Image (cartoon, grey):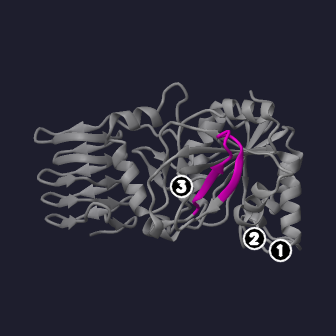
Amino acid sequence: MNQEAFGLIFTGEANPYMRDLVISRAVAAVPFGGRYRCIDFPLSNLVNSGIRNIGLITQRNYHSLMDHLGTGKEWDLNRKRDGLFFLPPFSTKDNTGVYRGDIDAFHSVMQYVRRSNQKYLILCGSHILFNTTFDALIKQHRESGADITFMYNEDPRFFPEEQNRDLRLLFEDDGVTVKELEWNPHHPRSNFRSCEATIMDKDLFDDLVEEAYSRGNIDFVREVLLPLARDKKFKVMGWRYDGYVARIDSINTYFMHSMELLNAAAAKDLYNMRHPIYTKVKDEFAAKYGENASVHNVMMADGCVIDGTVENSIVFRGVMVEAGAVVRNSILMQGVTVRAGAMLDHVILDKNVVVNAGRQLTGYEGIPLVFRKNLTV
């Protein structure tokens, strides 16, 4: 068990670019990769680093998230000491229960931060997915004497119309010391992007949040971290990660990264079995294929019954594709039913959607059709 650090995951991001997928759930609870939720990745990264004290800040639409995580048993976090702590909004004389921004959220959970016995805090988001351990990050942070260390990767892809929480790092000549940060730049000067995993001393975090809250600040990155990086009193460093990173910023990036999992190299990196991604266990039978089924280049979960054609798609648990139906370049979430003769291409179907017989649903690359959960089309 890692006695040096504890984790704090902020799941209150509001992202209009995710559209129908976040009408009734937080971004952290969005299904991804056939059988997982977005939250599974930061949570598993912390657990695989030996961290057993993890707080989960929630704000809105968090019921599905709580149902998915339960007691934290699948992550070995149902324990007497430390474990998984849900930190939902609540009303006090100082807090209305509605957060204006993440500074309000951090201030409301400061009692949890202060009573944690570990020295370092690893602050994570829930919409940037990767598979690693934080051992090297913690070691570099400790040995360098940094005040704050950002985990980052190099990513040249840029979607200016879909920016949500894009933090970029500019370095000194040594390539490690951060000289400046950019927040949602329209013309980025750097391809080094934060992975929303940041380590600092918990006492420094306490001081920064309390000072910002007293000034009426709202946004921790824009109003605290950006000026701090320019302040020479603080030593701000970067720790580079070269593995696969999926930024779930919008419907388009969600679709793009999901389809990239059909590439063996990306899937092997994100689902690296040296440090597995844990999720809620559901006992289902293995996928069943009918005599006329045709399946090619598909990530298929258990519990599915396939009698039609499925190509280049991500298929979650319990999906049924009837004979004569054709599904291409699509994402079918849990419990979806595609009736006989239906044709789907570049479509995202949320949980329990039913596509009636003979329907033809076609999106385009970069513009997939999205249908929210429980619809009959």
- Which residue does the image show at 83% across and 50% down from the upper left? 234
Mark 1 is surrounded, within 10 Å at the Cα level, by few (under 14), some (14 to 19) or many (20 or more) other residues, namely few
Task: Examine the structure image and report whether residue 180 is included in the region drawn in magenta.
Answer: yes
Q: Is residue 211 visible?
A: yes
Tell me which amino acid carries mark 2. Ile
Task: Look at the numbered discs 2 and 1 and tell me whether their residues touch, using CB distance below 8 Å.
Answer: yes
Tell me which amino acid carries mark 3. Ala
Q: Residue under label 1, please give it.
A: 216
Tell me which amino acid carries mark 1. Gly
52 to the left or right of 193: right
Q: Residue under label 2, please give it.
A: 218
In front: label 2 or label 3: 2
Q: Quadrant of residue 361?
A: bottom left
Give the secondary structure at mark 3: helix
Q: Image quadrant for the C terminus?
A: bottom left
Q: Is residue 292 above or below residue 216?
A: above
Which percent across, then down, holds residue 273? 49, 27
Q: Indicate which disc, 2 or 3, sits on the residue closer to the N terminus.
A: 3
Q: Indicate which disc, 3 or 1, sits on the residue closer to the N terminus.
A: 3
Task: Examine the structure image and report whether residue 282 is included in the region drawn in magenta.
Answer: no
Which percent across, then down, holds residue 17? 47, 68
Q: Is residue 343 above or below residue 23?
A: above
Q: Residue under label 3, please give it.
A: 29
Which percent across, then down, holds residue 221? 70, 61
Query: What is the magenta range?
Result: 165-181
Label placed on residue 165: none
